[in-house]
Image (cartoon, rainbow, N blue to C red):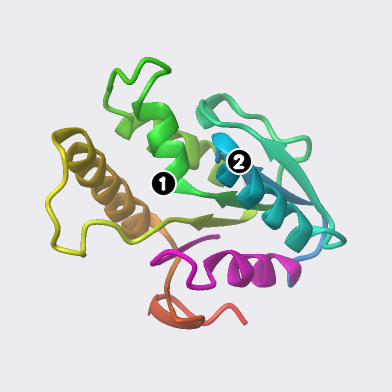
Amino acid sequence: MMILLTGGSACGKSSYAEEICMKASGPKYYLAAMRPYGEEGQKKVERHRRLRAGKGFETIERYTDYASLKLPEAGKTALLECICNLTANEMFDEEGNQSDPYERVVQGVENLRNQCSLLVVVTNDVGSDGLRYDPGTENYIRILGKINAVLAAGADMVIEMVAGIPILLKGADPL
């Protein structure tokens, strides 16, 4: 089963994703895709580590290439946080050059799905603010929207978080 959680920034997606995973039995993997750039990035990573502490997750920090990732135990629960970071990591190299990350990200999620009895994928709602951005950011938003759409179409359940409230868009309530 794959659950896709989407919503705006700081709306409770991570907490709800962890809550869903805590209901599952057996080993749990937290797949962290965020590269902690700078002090603010490091603070965010540390905050998420504190929030997960004692919940039984084994953390795997991996920024790219989920298509080749082999989890220590197949058939278990994994939480992938988040598609936005993974997409950016796959899209932009260290020099800022761009490539199309669509296939790499989608294949990576499919690889994880094939190894898990429950895969919870977190992403952000981007592009709905109506603002214009530089061409690189516009391209990122377009590709991320395409990735989110294909993941939502293939997910068993899609939940949008709004102000900490889960709104079921597809499937049955997991809790």
In the figure, is residue 130 to the left or right of 157? left
In the figure, is residue 70 to the left or right of 27? left
Q: Is residue 11 magenta?
A: yes
Kind of residue indicated by mark 2: Glu
> Residue 104: image x %, image y %?
39, 29
Q: Mark 2 packing: few (<14 Cα in 10 Å), some, or many (20+)?
A: few
Q: Total label count?
A: 2
In the figure, is residue 7 to the left or right of 131? right
Q: Is 44 situated above or below 87?
A: below
> Residue 75: image x %, image y %?
70, 48
Badge 2 element: helix
Q: Mark 1 packing: few (<14 Cα in 10 Å), some, or many (20+)?
A: many
Mark 2–mark 1 Cα distance, whole angstroms, equals 19 Å
Q: Is 152 situated above or below 41?
A: below
Residue corresponding to mark 2 = 39
The answer to whether residue 115 of the structure is visible from this angle is no
Nearer to the camera, 109 or 95? 95
Q: Quadrant of the C terminus?
A: bottom right
- Circle 2 or circle 1, nearest the eye: 2
The answer to whether residue 98 of the structure is visible from this angle is yes
Residue at 39%, 35% (x, y): give it. Answer: 88
Nearer to the camera, 138 or 60? 138
Residue at 33%, 61% (x, y): give it. Answer: 125
Q: Which residues are magenta?
A: 1-22
Residue at 42%, 59% (x, y): give it. Answer: 155
Kind of residue indicated by mark 1: Cys
Q: Residue furthest front?
A: 39
Badge 1 element: helix
Q: Residue furthest right?
A: 54
Q: Which label was assigned to residue 84?
A: 1
